Amino acid sequence: MNFLRQIKPRWTQKEAESADFTELTEHSHLGKSLVTIRDPYSAASEAYRSLRTNLFYGVKDYEATRLSGKSLQRRNGTRASSKTGSKASHLLSATDETALWDQRSSHLQTASKVIIVTSPGQMEGKSTICANLGVVLAQAAKSTLVMDCDFRKPEIHTFFGLPDTIGTTTILAGYHHLQEAWTEVEEGLKVLPAGPVPHNPAEILSSQRFLELIATVQKEFDYVLVDTYPIGSVTDAAILAAQGDGVLLVLDPQKTRKGDVMHARRNLDAVGANVLGMVMNNIKQGA
């Protein structure tokens, strides 16, 4: 019992002997970065909930601005501005897992249901953001699908402790139906792993069958979060960005270079992507 006293010195021996450690092991199969389930009361989890709020109400704010502009245009016969207003960037909290919502130059839409999550380069935290944002969306009673379409280095299944033998690629190959491939990991949250890595990711993402799959899940869920390969080096993310309703660009201020961000934005603009905002990951305390 000594180790129990070291963990929680105020416990009595009777309390220690009767303690229930089910919650400590219940999520042991989950990736340590899935803080919204493993540590839902942490500052990092609150940052994800703030990101969720910006996702919800940033869309509404933009729609109100857009409708107001249309009304003004009808009255004055002038062209309405397409800008989202003077709202500045929002720093959510100063934690190791902080997110930043950047609405500058965004073009938000109320129909943003299929959201592509990408980054300029590798190891910038896009999969971490995608998985945790999916959790907090489901916690807000939004039916959510986290869909792994990173067909080069898939990671979403590792966050939720799922196998990667069945997933998006096996659906597209005709081996499985959608309902057979996803797993409901939390109430309202389903996860679809990438499946076996194919040799031709860009061709698969451009196929008619993939377009039909996206159309199906768009009707099925309130939100579909699509994790994809970084946009800086291959065309996968650009292809998906053109098909989705919006894009979240994840940055790591410790790693991401300004030139890479500009290159990523040019690639997204080239396909007419609707960039919802930029999310900063791995902001250290005191930064």
Image (cartoon, rainbow, N blue to C red):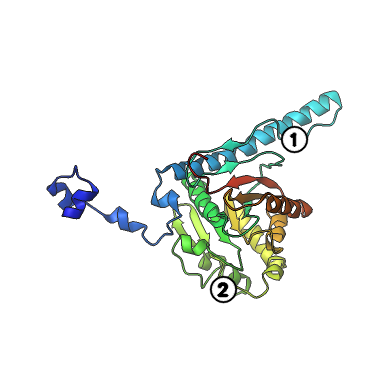
Residue visible at 68% across and 51% down in the picture:
261
Q: Residue 53 carries which label?
A: none
Residue visible at 49% across and 49% down in the picture:
138
* Closer to the camera in the image, 160 or 209: 160
Q: Which amino acid does label 1 sit on?
A: Lys
Q: What residue type is labelled 2?
A: Pro
Q: Where is residue 105 in the image (x, y as percent from the top left)?
A: 72, 40
Q: Is mark 1 on a helix, strand or loop?
A: loop
Instruction: Reply above or below: 272 against 154.
Output: above
Can the viewer see residue 80 in this picture? yes
In three-dimensional space, the C-alpha distance between marks 2 and 1, rounded to whole angstroms, equals 42 Å
Q: Where is residue 212 in the image (x, y as percent from the top left)?
A: 68, 63
Q: Name the residue under label 1.
A: 83
Instruction: Reply above or below: 6 against 235.
Output: above
Q: Name the residue under label 2.
A: 196
Quadrant where the image shows the N terminus: bottom left
Which badge, 2 or 1, is on the more N-terminal residue?
1
- The part of the image, by quadrant, that contains residue 168 is bottom right
Residue visible at 64% across and 50% down in the picture:
249
Q: Where is residue 69 in the image (x, y as percent from the top left)?
A: 76, 30
42 left or right, relative to 208: left
Q: Alpha-carbon neighbours of circle 1 within 10 Å: few (<14), some, or many (≥20)?
A: some
Q: Alpha-carbon neighbours of circle 2 within 10 Å: few (<14), some, or many (≥20)?
A: some
Can the viewer see residue 143 in this picture? no
